[in-house]
């Protein structure tokens, strides 16, 4: 199935309608749906779809050459190949009409022949930029794409006409994979799988979330049992050290010194270098309280695993790999996953609430336009959702409760108390309060919220967008 990606398709369509030469760069993590997006875009248009592999440079050139020849010829001579990459790229200028040329997994070409970007740059400047070719370079190695294609020192720097970092699907789109689930179950599934379409397709809404976890994640024959392990081993050198760091973060270690100690890979400076790589790959991010105006210089930064499924896998699978390999999936499900899943989902619920604030801002449903959206913490407390506008002197404070009971007025009272902790100097005097709850709100809270303009958001509303 193909779900969402309306804005990405619209951008591609705009570039296509320009009629002039376009060099579009699409990149993003594996399993995020790049190839499916491009295939959907190309489906009703003349195109060449070349997917690079790990084969030799000569074999890659032959396959690409035959794809170019086949665009205008019914038969392809056996063994046909252009004599060089430069010749193959120059041949694109002679293609009739408005040809789309997709070079998927472009980083594989670079790995086999690091001169390919320079060759393409030379041909683009001399021949292609004045044609009607629509060239799309697509890759999964984010760091390499940013360094070798988009970076200032890259040969192709300044040639791209547009680019897109394809992000995982948000909750609202991910929920559409499970029309048979309740909103609560849709949030649970997203909290476990995140927004990778490949992962979402692994679960079925014909059984509950726990049954899916048992069969697809904890089962050694499950589709997702080895997925993160293969992902890390394929994309990183020294995978053992990265595994240790990711496992340390998944177990609740969020500060640099804590992660270094838990991972045991060396001093904090060594761990910091590994974390830099993980951040480039969008596996890990460093966050600071939303009140920090200079995030890079803040000493309050903590690290977290960005992808929900990586968080789940490193917490529940990697930690119990020996038992799972012995066939004890049922025991791990009942003793480890089931008792703590609500707590695990609660963390993702907070992320969904922060995304919801951004959607509210886009639809002009907030009393101010936030400049920063995040959370807040210090030694005295924490706030799940915090949105700030320095220009308007306004802030939104939000609390999230993934619990079986409806939220009452005591939660709102506690949130109001935290306002002075967040803003002791009165920088944001205009305050809005918001509460997100799995199980709704008590009548007393609903009455108070209506009188005071407090935002109350249920699981149903969060999934609906």
Image (cartoon, rainbow, N blue to C red):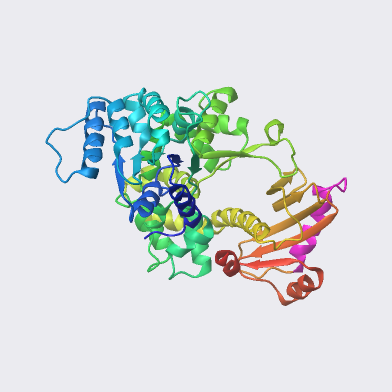
Residue 418 among magenta residues: yes
* Residue 425, x across and y down, in percent: 88, 45
Quarter of the N terminus within the rendering:
bottom left
Total tally of numbered discs in the picture: 0
Q: Quadrant of residue 29?
A: top left
Main secondary structure type of the part rendered in magenta? helix
Residue 71: image x %, image y %?
24, 44
Q: Which residues are magenta?
A: 409-427
Tell me the quadrant of the picture where the C terminus can be found: bottom right
Q: Is residue 327 left or right of residue 364?
A: left
Whether 82 is among the magenta residues is no
Write the residue at 76% across / 63% down: 412
Q: Residue at x 22, y 29 (%)?
A: 82
* Residue with the most extreme right position: 425
Residue 261: image x %, image y %?
57, 30
User: Residue 337 location, x and y as percent?
Assistant: 47, 55
Taking 75 as reference, is 430 above or below it?
below
Q: Closest to the observer: 153 or 70?
A: 70
State whether residue 336 appears in this view: no
Q: Is residue 458 above or below residue 308?
A: below
* 78 and 280: which is toward the camera: 78
Residue 2 left/right relative to 395? left
Q: Is residue 118 visible?
A: yes
Q: Image check: 239 left or right of 270?
A: left
């Amino acid at each position: 199935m193909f779900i969402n990606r309306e804005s990405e398709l619209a951008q591609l369509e705009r570039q296509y309608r320009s009629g002039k030469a376009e060099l579009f760069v699409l990149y993003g993590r594996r399993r995020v749906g790049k190839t499916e997006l491009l295939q959907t875009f190309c489906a009703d248009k003349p195109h060449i779809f070349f997917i690079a592999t790990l084969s030799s440079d000569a074999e890659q050139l032959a396959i690409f050459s035959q794809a170019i020849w086949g665009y205008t010829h019914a038969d392809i001579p056996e063994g046909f190949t252009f004599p060089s990459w430069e010749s193959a790229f120059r041949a694109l200028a002679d293609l009739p009409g408005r040809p789309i040329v997709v070079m998927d997994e472009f980083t594989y070409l670079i790995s086999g022949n690091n001169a390919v970007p320079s060759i393409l740059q030379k041909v683009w400047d001399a021949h292609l930029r004045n044609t009607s070719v629509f060239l799309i370079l697509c890759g999964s190695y984010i760091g390499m794409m940013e360094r070798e294609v988009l970076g200032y020192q890259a040969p192709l720097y300044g040639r791209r006409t547009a680019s897109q970092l394809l992000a995982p699907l948000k909750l609202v789109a991910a929920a559409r994979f499970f029309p048979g689930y309740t909103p609560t179950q849709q949030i649970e599934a997203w909290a476990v799988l995140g927004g990778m379409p490949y992962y979402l397709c692994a679960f079925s809404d014909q059984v509950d979330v726990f049954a899916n976890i048992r069969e697809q994640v904890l089962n050694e024959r499950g589709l997702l049992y080895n997925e993160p392990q293969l992902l890390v081993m394929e994309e990183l050198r020294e995978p053992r050290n990265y595994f240790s760091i990711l496992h340390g973060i998944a177990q609740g270690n969020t500060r640099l010194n804590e992660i270094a100690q838990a991972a045991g890979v060396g001093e904090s400076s060594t761990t910091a270098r590994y974390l830099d790589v993980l951040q480039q790959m969008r596996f890990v991010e460093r966050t600071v309280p939303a009140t920090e105006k200079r995030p890079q210089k803040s000493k309050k930064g903590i690290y977290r695993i960005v992808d929900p499924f990586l968080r789940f896998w490193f917490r529940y699978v990697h930690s119990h790999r020996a038992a799972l390999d012995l066939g004890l999936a049922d025991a791990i499900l009942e003793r480890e996953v089931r008792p703590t899943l609500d707590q695990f989902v609660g963390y993702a619920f907070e992320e969904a609430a922060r995304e919801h604030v951004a959607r509210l801002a886009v639809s002009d449903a907030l009393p101010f336009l936030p400049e920063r959206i995040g959370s807040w913490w210090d030694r005295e407390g924490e706030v799940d959702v915090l949105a700030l506008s320095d220009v308007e002197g306004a802030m939104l404070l939000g609390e999230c409760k993934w619990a079986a009971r409806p939220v009452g007025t005591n939660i709102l009272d506690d949130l109001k108390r935290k306002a002075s902790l967040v803003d002791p100097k009165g920088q944001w005097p205009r305050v809005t309060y918001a509460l997100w709850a799995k199980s709704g709100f008590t009548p007393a809270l609903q009455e108070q919220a209506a009188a005071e303009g407090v935002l109350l958001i249920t699981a149903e509303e969060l999934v609906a967008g």
